[in-house]
Image (spheres, helix red, strand yellow):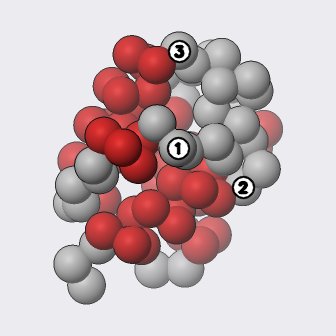
Amino acid sequence: MTDQEMLENLREVITEFVDMKPEEITFDTNMRSDLGLNSLELVNMAVAIEDKFGVEIPDREVSRIETLKDVIDVIRDYSED
């Protein structure tokens, strides 16, 4: 899966949590400042991302995620493919 395809899938998940248009969500979108997610919301979104991509993201990685590019990198790091 390309980064762009992963971004499209992430947009689907994110728009379930925040009121944003998918096209406003980019690789550089910051999970906290741009999306306004607090720590609990970030964990809940991580669970939804895990379900969408079939990957398990360790809690320590969730706390380090800043941007959507970081999310993609973590998915790739923990993917079993």
Q: Residue at 42% of width from left, 73% of height from top?
A: 76
Residue that carries the numbered disc 2 in the rendered image:
27
Is residue 79 positioned above or below 15 on the image?
Answer: below
Q: Is residue 52 visible?
A: no
Type of amino acid at the residue the image marks with label 2: Phe
Instruction: For marks 1 and 3, give the one nearer the viewer.
Output: 1
Query: In the image, is 59 to the left or to the right of 69?
Result: left
Depth check, front residue: 41 or 10:
41
Query: In the image, is 10 to the left or to the right of 76?
Result: right
Instruction: For marks 2 and 3, give the one nearer the viewer.
Output: 3
Quadrant location of residue 53? bottom left
Residue that carries the numbered disc 3 in the rendered image:
38
Depth check, front residue: 19 or 71:
71
Type of amino acid at the residue the image marks with label 1: Arg
Q: Position of residue 66 (x, y in %)?
A: 64, 42
Tell me how far mark 2 sits from mark 3, CA to CA: 19 Å
Is residue 77 positioned above or below 12 on the image?
Answer: below
N-terminal of the pair, mark 2 or mark 3, is 2
Q: Is residue 55 visible?
A: yes
Q: Residue at 70% of width from left, 31% of height from top?
A: 21
Kindly state the secondary structure of the residue where label 1 is placed.
Answer: loop
Residue that carries the numbered disc 1 in the rendered image:
64
Tell me how far mark 2 sits from mark 1, CA to CA: 16 Å
Circle 3 residues within 10 Å: few <14, some 14–19, many ≥20: few
Q: Residue at 21% of width from left, 78% of height from top?
A: 80
Q: Position of residue 50 (x, y in %)?
A: 27, 49
Circle 1 residues within 10 Å: few <14, some 14–19, many ≥20: few
Query: In the image, is 34 to the left or to the right of 2?
Result: right
Type of amino acid at the residue the image marks with label 3: Asn
Q: Position of residue 61 (x, y in %)?
A: 41, 48
